[in-house]
Amino acid sequence: MSIAQSIKKMKDLHEDYEEKIEEIQKKHLHAVKEKALLKLEKDKLQKKVGDIQRQIKDHEERVQKQIDASMKKQRMGGRAERTVQVKGMNTPWPEDARPNPYLSETFEGINDKLSCQKPFTAHSKGIGGMALHAKKQIVATAGDDCTWKIWNLENQENIMTGEGHKDWISAIDFHPAGSHLTTGGGDKSIKVWDFINSTIAHTFADVHTGPVWKLKFHDTGDFILSASGDGSVKLFDLNSMKMRQQFRSHTDSVNGLNFQPFTNFFVTGSADKTTSIWDMRTGLTVQTFYGHLNTINDAVFSIGGQYVATCDSDGIVKLWDIRMVQEQFTLDTGDHICHALAFDKATKSLAVGCSDNTIKFINIEKGDITTSLKGHDGAVNAIYINHDNSALYSTGNDGTVRVWK
């Protein structure tokens, strides 16, 4: 090969390398630009994340301040630090070892010779349900006029009125902290109301195929139980806002519903004439009691959790000892329907609201009627004995609330 040919060949190779070097330089420049853009985008995203985190923190602090201020103003006490969470994860099941504070207290038996003190009209139509605040002499009423109302019983002042249900309301209960309320009724929905912001915190829509007859908060405030005309009971988690359990064994409407105080168990009374005790964590029945011959309309625990009382549409009241798993007594209160029950705090008396417009007191030890309170102009649908056994509150089809002392 001549020198001229070698030079030409080297020249060609050099030109080829220059093209490749130029191409590599272009790719490198493009990669550098890509990296710079990615870094810029990353910085923007990090800034945005930081801004969102600060907003969340500011919002949480603002909400917490509102809650603290409202709780201080309302002086709710007790479990005021526990509030219903709108969003979150499933709540862990509560532990069994939760002390019942009422067991360390001593109560005098309620005076069964009570008289009515200044009744007042609470709703324009009948009142299907009532709830007593955990600490104050305040009740919430659920009306056939599709509204709920909160009343200060010391001065008969209407503190708050709520509208939002599309049909009558029969189920109502206070959150243990007193900061929220739950309602349900003929529109088959369950609503949780936030008093702090005067809004609906959440609606569980069409959760049953029948009307919602009873609603109960768990003592932790994290769960709500609902009992329905469709024969089912459901448990809702207020942190995740999801249904956690569904309890099915009743073959007819579930009308009575109550938690055993400070436990994870609850009792139901049904139109299928049976009473069942359930474990809310497993969804299974612990015990079922038989004996009623007609629809059971209410089922309640005594404050110590030892006894369950039930009543039916034949006017029959039964007392059950759940530790001995046996019936203590059966009492025929007369030719009428028994709608509602309430133990006094000393577990010496049992009050019964009836369709003959009366409230009857039963001596638990003797199993007989001691007195009958007259005053309502319609069936008595809900009754509560107050915190210190000094008074009884009642309401019913006449739309009135009555304080008996």
Image: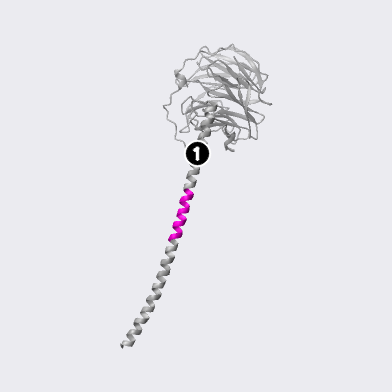
User: Which amino acid type is marked by label 1?
Assistant: Glu
Q: Is residue 45 above or below residue 77?
A: below
Can residue 269 be seen here? The reply is no
Whether the magenta-drawn stretch holds residue 37 is answered as yes
User: Which of the pair 23/261 is nearer the observer?
Assistant: 23
Residue range corresponding to the magenta coloring = 35-49
> Residue 18's quadrant in the figure?
bottom left
Whether the magenta-drawn stretch holds residue 275 is answered as no
Q: State the SS at label 1.
A: helix
Can residue 18 be seen here? The reply is yes
Residue 9 position within the rendered picture, expressed as x and y whole percent measured from the top left: 35, 83
Q: Colour scheme used in the picture?
A: one colour
Q: Is residue 333 above or below residue 159?
A: above
> Residue 229's quadrant in the figure?
top right
Task: Assess disc 1: are there few (<14), some (14-19) or many (≥20) residues with their C-alpha within 10 Å of its C-alpha.
Answer: few
> Residue 195's quadrant in the figure?
top right
- Screen quadrant of the C terminus: top right
Residue 369 position within the rendered picture, expressed as x and y whole percent measured from the top left: 57, 12
**Would you name the residue on which mark 1 appears?**
60
Q: Is residue 109 above or below residue 227?
A: above
Residue 248 position within the rendered picture, expressed as x and y whole percent measured from the top left: 52, 33
Label count reads 1
Residue 41 position within the rendered picture, expressed as x and y whole percent measured from the top left: 47, 56
Most common secondary structure along the magenta stretch: helix
- Screen quadrant of the N terminus: bottom left
Q: Residue furthest right?
A: 124
